[in-house]
């Protein structure tokens, strides 16, 4: 019995230690404090993920997804809006992958049109920066290989609009991944909402709708 408890505690401690942010993350948090105003209250963040560029059909390490079908991947893309830990590494240090929303799933692809919108409500909390986290993987029979991760930042230098009617979509943004040929295009808007409209969820995002051009 005691041996089992020791094993459980050891595993739990290892997970806790691995999830502690590193000095680079904490230093960026400190810099953000001096660079960006704090936005707090009840507000909604909407993000449109438009397209993922992977022209060579490669993974994060520039290796072809499929050696038999060079230039093609079995692509799965998911995303999350992270206002709480925007500077931290992907994975257990920030939003768990299980909380990401699937926004694309296809086979034999390279660059893909996504055209999906996700939303996140922040309820009586505060942030200086938001990270639209996008993750793409190549599906394999036994595992998934990372195509790339993208951190798409929203800064409080452009604060939320007063309400949905006043909110305007940003210009289309382009963010490069670890592999410079991998890019995503996206845009966002955010705005304050009434307390009774706020739907809190733990570090995750929920799918809103497929992007309809010229709407909103």
Image: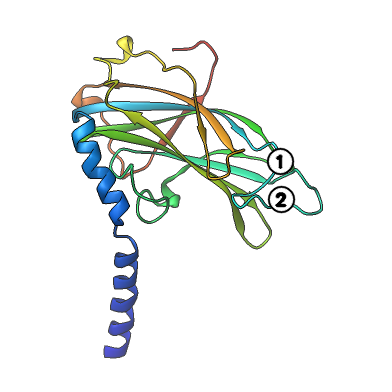
Q: Residue furthest right?
A: 68
Q: Dot 2: few (<14), some (14–19), or many (≥20) neighbours within 10 Å?
A: some
Residue placed most toward the observer, 132 or 205: 132
Which residue appears at 27% of the width and 37% of the height? 200
Q: Position of residue 108 (x, y in %)?
A: 74, 42
Which residue appears at 34% of the width and 49% of the height? 88
Q: Position of residue 182 (x, y in %)?
A: 59, 38
Residue 167, picture quadrant: top left
Which residue appears at 24% of the width and 37% of the height? 32
Residue 124 in view, yes or no: no
Q: Examine the rendered structure and indicate whether residue 138 appears above or below residue 123.
A: below
What number of labels is visible?
A: 2
Q: Position of residue 45 (x, y in %)?
A: 34, 27
In the visual, does 164 lie left or right of 212? left
The residue pinned by badge 1 equals 56
Which quarter of the rendered picture does the N terminus lie within? Answer: bottom left
The disc label shown at residue 64, or none? 2
SS of the residue under disc 2? loop
Q: Position of residue 208 (x, y in %)?
A: 45, 28
Circles 1 and 2, Cβ within 8 Å, touching? The answer is yes
Residue placed most toward the observer, 4 or 72: 72
Q: Dot 1: few (<14), some (14–19), or many (≥20) neighbours within 10 Å?
A: some
Sooner in the amino-acid sequence: mark 1 or mark 2: 1
Residue 201, picture quadrant: top left
Q: Examine the rendered structure and indicate whether residue 13 appears above or below residue 149.
A: below
Which quarter of the rendered picture does the C terminus lie within? Answer: top left
Q: CA distance from mark 1 to mark 2?
A: 8 Å
Q: Examine the rendered structure and indicate whether residue 203 appears above or below residue 91.
A: above
Which residue appears at 62% of the width and 60% of the height? 143
Residue 76 in view, yes or no: yes
The disc label shown at residue 213, or none? none
């Amino acid at each position: 019995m005691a041996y089992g408890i020791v094993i459980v505690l050891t595993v739990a401690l290892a997970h806790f230690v691995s999830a502690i942010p590193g000095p680079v993350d904490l230093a960026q948090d400190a810099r953000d404090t001096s660079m960006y105003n704090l936005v707090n209250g009840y507000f909604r963040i909407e993000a449109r993920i438009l397209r993922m560029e992977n022209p060579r059909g490669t993974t994060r390490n520039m290796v072809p997804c499929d050696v038999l079908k060079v230039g093609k991947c079995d692509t799965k893309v998911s995303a999350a809006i992270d206002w709480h830990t925007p500077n931290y590494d992907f994975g257990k240090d920030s939003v768990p992958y299980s909380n990401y929303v699937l926004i694309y799933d296809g086979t034999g692809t390279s660059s893909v049109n996504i055209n999906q919108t996700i939303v996140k409500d922040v309820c009586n909390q505060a942030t200086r920066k938001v990270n639209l986290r996008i993750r793409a993987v190549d599906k394999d029979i036994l595992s998934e290989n990372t195509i790339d991760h993208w951190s798409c930042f929203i800064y409080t230098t452009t604060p939320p609009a007063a309400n949905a009617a006043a909110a305007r979509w940003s210009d289309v943004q382009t963010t490069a991944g670890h592999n410079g040929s991998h890019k995503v295009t996206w845009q966002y808007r955010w705005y304050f909402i009434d307390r009774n409209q706020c739907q809190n969820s733990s570090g995750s995002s929920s799918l809103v709708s497929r992007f309809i051009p010229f709407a909103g």
